[in-house]
Image (tube, helix red, strand yellow):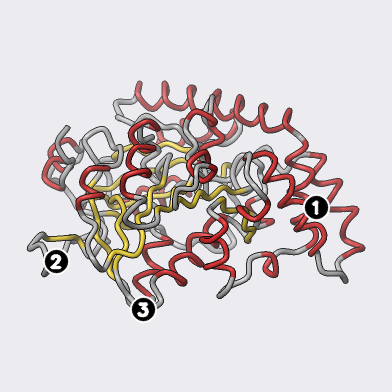
Amino acid sequence: MKNFNRRDWLKTSVLGLGSLPLITGKLSAKTNSASGQHWNSESMLWEMNPIYKDVKMKARLLANENPFGPSSGVQKAIAESISLGNRYGHADAAYLIDMLAEKEGVKPENIMLGPGSTDMLEKTAIVLCQHGGNVISADPSYMSLVNTAKAMGGDWKAVPLKADYSHDLDGMESAIDSATKLLYVCNPNNPMGAITDPVALKAFCKSAGKKRPIFVDEAYLEFMEKPEDHTMVGLVREGHDVMVARTFSKIHGMAGLRIGYMVATEERIKSITSMVRGTMGLCVTSLKGAIASLKDEKFIDSCRKWNKESKEYTLDQVKSMGFDPITSHTSFMIFPIQQEGKAFAGKMMDQGVGIRVYSIADSPWCRVSMGTMDEMKLFVDALKTVTA
């Protein structure tokens, strides 16, 4: 399938060549001197969200938060651990690492903890790109790792998504050069919500992973019906130089408690922890909460079910209004809109509904997180009012 480039994106957008958003992602190119190929140094994706202060939202659907968590068991564990706040949580961290190692089928030495998966992304970028080089990833995609790498003096080689919004794995592998430090894959992808075929991704990780380390961000994987069929953790067990990030922020409903983890080879974990520490950024309450959440499989299954119900309802309603959402495998969905982005977000906020807006290849898009069914009904009503 051909690459989904900027021109194709504009042609298929419902906006066409009409009004542009206030913040436009003008694509600029860098020339790779070794190959003569041109690589985007700036993303075709820009967030363009106004900052709201002291706004009470009826439906907070702008941060991909789980509206159902944390579970009652997590809340109880956190409440009981507050009295331990004067002690470091090293023992709890070790216990949690053992739990995660058993869950993922790896050794404890293959696990690194941190305050959310974003922390894993950024620390990896700091360590691998401290002397520059480049990072290869899809565009559009989640930008934390890329932005940190660029802040460290590195470059970004952006490979446009394919027409079905999956990663162009062949294009990413062909982009590897002598300066490449890391390849990053967000799967399912944020903010597009699409999934890349696991068979193809595993083959890519095995092939490209022989040349450079690969980071697979699976923050939203557990919202899928069979996440075990899509994870790349098995490659770590086989000894491949692959890093896999997971988080308690999404399906576990612990976004504000800040805890996540990475699965990687023992050598890769050591190379990172020799420079930065993970567990020192964690508090005992978060550790106790994560331990309790791992034991509550019923709550996780319920969240997966509730998210699916909200997403199916919202998808039907949004489609009936003439919008064209991308098929989502996450806890959010995204679709192009026909209004300037910031103005659209402001109108939705006037209705008490918070959403996220992006400019993608100079066209505005709305990303809505899945909330409770009542919250999604508020979103649908607000969308109808704003687009009437």
Residue 377: in sight, yes or no?
A: no
Disc 1 residue crowd, few under 14, some 14–19, many 20+, Cα 10 Å: many
> Which residue is at 7% across, 63% downward?
36
Amino acid type, label 2: Asn
259 above or below 163? below
Image position, residue 262 (x, y; %) = 57, 53
Local SS, label 3: loop
> Which residue is at 34% across, 57% downward?
212
Local SS, label 1: helix
Mark 1–mark 2 CB contact (< 8 Å): no
Image position, residue 196 (x, y; %) = 35, 35
Give the label on residue 131, or none: 3
Q: Earlier in the sequence, mark 3 or mark 2?
A: 2
Residue bearing the label numbered 1: 288
Image position, residue 29 (x, y; %) = 14, 64
Along the line of sight, the residue nearer the viewer: 247 or 360: 247
Q: Earlier in the sequence, mark 1 or mark 2?
A: 2
Local SS, label 2: loop
> Which residue is at 45% across, 72% downward?
126
Residue bearing the label numbered 2: 32
77 above or below 131? above
Disc 3 residue crowd, few under 14, some 14–19, many 20+, Cα 10 Å: few
Image position, residue 123 (x, y; %) = 51, 67
Disc 2 residue crowd, few under 14, some 14–19, many 20+, Cα 10 Å: few
Amino acid type, label 1: Lys
Amino acid type, label 3: His
